[in-house]
Every structure is written in structure tokens, then in C-alpha cells.
Image (tube, rainbow, N blue to C red):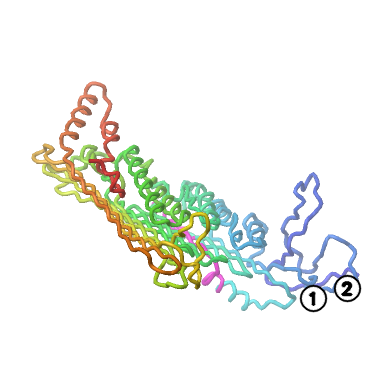
Amino acid sequence: MNPITAAQRLAPVLTAPQPAPASASNPTGIASVSAVPSTSVILGQSNTISDSETYSRQGLLPGQVRYVWEKDSQDKLATTLQTAFQSSSSAGRFKGIGAALIEQLAQNGGKNISQSVFAFSDDSPIDPGVLKLQQQRLRENPDSGVTFSLTTASGATIRLSLASSEKGLAVSAEVEGGSLSSEELKGLGNLADSFQSTIDGLNEVPPQLKLGALVKLDPKLFSSLQMNSKFESLSGEQTFSLSLDDKARSLSLQGPSGQVQLSLDTQDAELLGKSAQRKAAIDNYLTQFDAAQRRGRGDENLMNLFKNAFTQLNSIDDNRQPAVQSPTALNDKDRALLSGLADFSASISETTRRSNPMRLDETDSFTFSTSQSTTVKNRGLQDRSVEQNQQSKLTASFHRGLNPLTNLMLGSDRESQNYSYHLIDDQASSTTRLAYDKGQLVEASATQQASQKERILTYVDGHLKSDVTTPKAVTQSRNVLNLLRDAFEQDRIAQRDRGVSLLEGLLQSQRSRWLLQTDPSKIAA
């Protein structure tokens, strides 16, 4: 018996795609997703049905899934939605959807998009009001979701939304406050892959930051961007936020292992140095971040996220258009002792753990913060001054076994209590100052400071055997006035005789004297 049953539905009911034999027209052997006619449902790949197989009113075999759509459509977005929805992992729920949504919005000229799909495994009739309520709840309170807002230079705002739950998946796209030009539509389409790579990267284990073109917007087309996401996984909830405009950039990522935060003040573009100067500063910071992670035994994956965030947000300036030089603007000489980066504040903090059941006051923790601030006085005048301060702070604590050949397994028995407990408290700073009097350079100084303190408590069979604190501190102040005067003079001659500037090359080997250094032993005399 092979009955064909009538079905009433609010939107096309789709059965899960079934494998099909490979052929020349269908080399993959995967059936296309298509709407089942409302008057009939054809089930399975075989014309033979055993007596034990019982059909529902909707023509479904027991356990078979039907899909109810918000709108009848067989476009690429709908196909991508069903493929992603059938993914067995929550991480795969948004696979390809972000790119497909942007591409469809760009291709249809910016017309609003709204689509959702829900899975049902029973044959209960679907009430339109209930379905609408489910769609609303999914969009307002998803288990996992992504929102994306992009403002164009002309004033229009593009809003995207992706929402997922156990039984549903929904997307929407709309344009507010104006229409999109052909150039803006093309620019939007160019962001599709980077939007998708960002989503995919955040869903990797461990998470990765793959922001791509999202952090390199064309200012002629777009003025600001905001992206937020929340993902649920077996290990816990992860949230992400990215915000960019012409005044500030910020990124925040928080998950089960800890959080990363970064904020850049980009209002004063005159502080930015040339590419080589900025690269030297970024490389130096990354070196300090690695040193902090090793010293405090921080989570390597979380630190990699921190480093990637720092690198990618600062790389926005690599291809910036040079500003028109005005009489009141800072020049390369004024920036000689600066990092060349925008002012910022950044921090990384691991989730605190209590790994010793016998001493719950002993925590395993890692927190590192760093920042840069710059002050310019009498900008453009002949008695101007520029001062920049870079600083960092590390606090960490961890347990280490006394026997390097065995893993530390702390328990409630004294035999397991053979370990050293380390508490780290480090601080570092670098201050540079450059000043003019009546147009003549009269001051150029650099001060580096670093202090490290480690307290080590050693326990044998649960008994405290030693408590030792080791402090280190170094402060080095330098007058680099003659160094800069010589560099400026050589650069002047090179520009006069050969039409080229040598200033950056002359300063490059000297920057270790004033960039941030967190290790006292590496601050040269």
C-alpha cells in the first residue's frame, strides 16, 4: 500500500533531503530541496512499503521530519538554511548562512528579507498564530544568534539578524533610512565572505578571530559597523562584540575560558606613524604579550585571541589614505618617539579556578592589561610638546607540581599536596617626551620602568616548607636629544640631495630604548 495523503500547511512542508543515485546530471547524489505539493507527499526512495510502516495524516513515516517555512522559496538562501539546520552540531547551524544572506540582499537591490524554518517530527496540525509566536520568540530570544549593523556614508543602515534554536532557524535583512547605491550594494556583497569567516571562526574549537574585510571598511562607502553574537556550546556560552567607526574601535569576546577586551581611540589620526613604525610597535607588544603568558602560565588559546584582536584592529590603518598635511599637524619628527599606534586600552582575563580542594583560597588566575595614552600640547605652535605613556600590569597565580615527571593531581589527601603555589605581580611602563622652544627641539627623553614580584609557597605532604618572595625592579631614563638631532639632520640632507627620507630607518634600531619592556633584565643600561 502506498497512499498519497492530503496536507494543509501554512508554508511549504519540506521533507529532509534523501540520498539519490549519482548521475551525470546529479554527480553528488544529493537530492535538491524542493517544496512538496500541498495535495500530496511522496515518501522514501522505494516503491515497496512494508506492512509495519504506518503513515501519519501528513504522509510522514514515524521519526521523519517535516520543515515548515515562513515563505515559499527555493532560492540559495533557503537551501543554505535547510542544509545548515540539518547539521548535527550547533556550531554548524550558521554555516554559509551569513554569506548567503548578504549576497541575496546585495543581489536583490537591498529589498528586505525575512525567512525562517521550523522542524516538526509529528503530524499535529500547525496553528498560524502559534507558528507566528514561535518565529517571534526565536528572533527575540535565540539560543544562538548574530546581529550585524552597517551604516553607509550616505546615511542608510543595513541590519542583519541570524537566530537559532533547537527547533528553528531564522534570518532577516533590512535597509533603513535610505536606499543603497550600486557601489554600496557591491561593497556590501564584498563583505559576505568575511562576515561568514568571522562567524565560522568564532564557532571553531578553540575560537578564532577571522575578521578579514570587516575591519577594513571603505570609508567612502561605510561609516560604521556593529556586530554582536551569542553562541551556546557544550562548554558554555560565548559572546562577541565588534564596533567600528571614525572615532573608536572596540572588540570584546567572553567565553568559558575567560574574556578579551580591546578599545582604540582613533579620533586623533595624527598620532599614527608610517607602516614600518606601527609594525615595530605591534611586534614589540606581541612579544610582551607572549612573555606575560609564559610567566603567568596563562591560557595559550585565549592569549592568541588577544594577540589576533590587537593585530587586526591596529592593521586597519595599514592602507589608510594619507591626510592632507596642514601647518598645525604633527609631522614625522614629532612622532619620532611615539609608537605610531592609536591610543588604546586592552585586557585579557581568565576564568578563575580553584583546583586545590584542601586550600580553596588558592586560585589559578591570569589577568593582563595594557594601555597607551598620548598628550599633545600647543599643537602646531613653535613651543609644542608631545608625551606618550605605555603601561602594562600582570597578576597571576598557579600551582606547579614538585615532581616534573608526573602530573599534578591535587586532592583531599595530604599525599597529593606536594606542589609550589606561585603568585605573580608585575608592572611596566614607558614614557617618552619631545618638546620644542621657538621651533627648536629642546627636549627628547625616554624612561622605561619594569618591576616583577613572585611569591612562591612550597608544600610537602600538605605542610608549608617555604615562603619566598623575589622582587626585581629597574628604571632607566635616557636623554635622546642628540640622537634625534643627528637623525633629523641626516634625514634633512638625504631629502635635499636624494629626495628620500631616511628617518624611519635611522630610528628603527633605536626603538627598543623607548618602547614598552616588561622584563627588567631586558632594559638596557
Instruction: Decide: is 171 above or below 341.
Output: below
Is 141 part of what is drawn in magenta?
Answer: yes
Say left or right for 358 vs 326: right
Judging from the image, what secondary structure is the residue with disc 2 in? loop
- Of 42 and 423, which appears nearest the observer? 423
- Of 82 and 514, which appears nearest the observer? 514
Is 385 part of what is drawn in magenta?
Answer: no
Q: Residue 277: horizontal and vertical position, in percent? A: 31, 39
Say left or right for 130 vs 416: right
Where on the picture, by quarter, is residue 162?
bottom right
Q: In the image as oriented, which residue stretches furthest toward the left? A: 438
- Of 251 and 301, which appears nearest the observer? 301
Q: State which region is magenta.
A: 137-159
Asked if residue 110 shows in the view, the reply is: no
Q: Amino acid at mark 1?
A: Arg
Q: Residues within 10 Å of mark 1 (few under 14, many from 20)?
A: some
Residue at 68% across / 76% down in the picture? Answer: 126
Task: Indicate which disc, 1 or 2, sits on the residue closer to the N terminus.
Answer: 2
Residue bearing mark 1: 57
Instruction: Decide: is 496 above or below 282.
Output: above
Q: Residue 259: horizontal and vertical position, in percent? A: 42, 61
Where on the picture, by quarter, is residue 3?
bottom right
Residue at 41% across / 52% down in the picture? Answer: 294
Q: Residue 137: horizontal and vertical position, in percent? A: 55, 74
Say left or right for 411 vs 362: right
